[in-house]
Image (cartoon, rainbow, N blue to C red):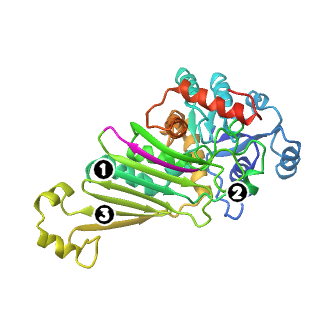
Amino acid sequence: MDKIRYGLIGIGAQGGAYAGFLTGKGGFPGMPAPECPPHCALGALCDIDPAKEAMCREKYPEIPFFTDWKEMVESGTVDAVITTVPHYIHTEIAIYCLEHGMNVLVEKPAGVYAKDVHRMNGCAAAHPDVAFGIMFNQRTNVLYQKIRELIASGELGQIRRSNWIINSWWRPDSYYRQSDWRATWGGEGGGVLVNQAPHQLDLWQWICGVPSKVYAKCLYGCHREIVVENDVTVVTEYPNGATGSFITCTHDPIGTDRLEIDLEGGKIVVEGSKTATVYRLNKNEDELNATMSMMELAKITSGNSAGGEGLYTTETFENTDGWGVQHTTVMENFACHILEGTPLLAPGSDGINGVRLANAILLSDWLGREVDMPVDEDVYLSELNKKIAEEGKFPTR
């Protein structure tokens, strides 16, 4: 076997794009389609919507189509599945696949609440011979890979503070009206934290570590006709005393995507997930603080509150990969993991970190206080079920 045949469960916007990637017939609207990865192929499609079935049979007549995902898993037409379905169903499908020896690449987020994801991870641990990954495609961005490696090397010392403003998620009401489950507690499990921002929540912890304390303020239906969170401000604390902040929303049509990481020996700034600048202090900040005179300070900061001349050097690098290339890179990595044992860029078990942080953010706001990480999984699920019950559209979990 030299190719992994992927089965796509759910042919909505994401699943439809993946079908295009795996056949060379398209991708995300308005973006050039990447080439199909060399070790990947489209094996089967699955959806319960008759309109999706008609579209798939016309566009991909040679590809088997199923209306029951369990039948597809057991059909022998696929070697791995991708779960492009509503978030609550990710864990159900993944657990079934793992228990039946089917390799599974879970779409983000891993799930809605940590207790459910914990159960999925336990199942994966009990079936170590079955490949289990998650579609954290932004981990393929060379900017974030280099930054992670640089911080892990210790060259710039410990992190003191990190700040991420990620407001480039503008979504009008028409977006939320696409499906009845969107932007609901019972159907989607939340808003920006479970839909748009999981990639940044993953990268933030992948690079800067897992916080120990979280305090958050969330706004629900801010400038939108929805009930879930779409404006979030978070403050975090880490075991080493570092702090962080994370700001995101879906009502800013101009948008900002800026990550800043302050360290003992410098600073890293990423703009738009495309350009990273590394500032390396000529002396660690502690040494500068202990030795710099007021006269030297005046020379550095004269006419410029940021100063800089003679204080640091800079290095800049860029990322040019498109979104589709990132997704196909994860697919190819997952395929090579199955075929050759290549290490996974994003092991499925990593998905719980972002879910735990999202749960902590919401729980902090619901309780009106700072919470410790990880939060009590049963307490979070209880509070989530209160939201689902108040909404009155879906069964509680």
Q: In this view of the protein, which residue sits in the foreground, 98 or 29?
A: 29
- Among numbered discs 1 and 2, the one appearing first in the sequence: 2
Q: What secondary structure do most residues of the magenta stretch adopt?
A: strand
Q: Quadrant of residue 224?
A: bottom right
Q: Secondary structure at mark 2?
A: loop
Q: CA distance from mark 2 to mark 3?
A: 37 Å
Residue 50 appears left or right of 114: right
- Residue projecting furthest to the front: 368
The residue wearing badge 1 is 160
- The residue sitting at 57% across, 39% down in the picture is 134
Dot 1: few (<14), some (14–19), or many (≥20) neighbours within 10 Å?
A: some
Q: Residues within 10 Å of mark 3 (few under 14, many from 20)?
A: many
Residue 27, numbered label: 2
Frontmost of labels 1 and 2 is 1
Badge 3 element: strand
Q: Which mark is residue 279?
A: 3
Q: Is residue 385 visible?
A: yes
Between label 2 and label 3, give the one nearer the viewer.
3
Residue 103 versus residue 354: which sits nearer the camera?
354
| Disc 3 residue type (three-letter) | Tyr
Location of residue 255 with respect to 343 vertically, above or below = below
- Magenta range is 231-239
Callout 2 amino acid: Gly
Q: Amino acid at mark 1?
A: Arg
Q: Residue at x 13, y 64 (%)?
A: 292
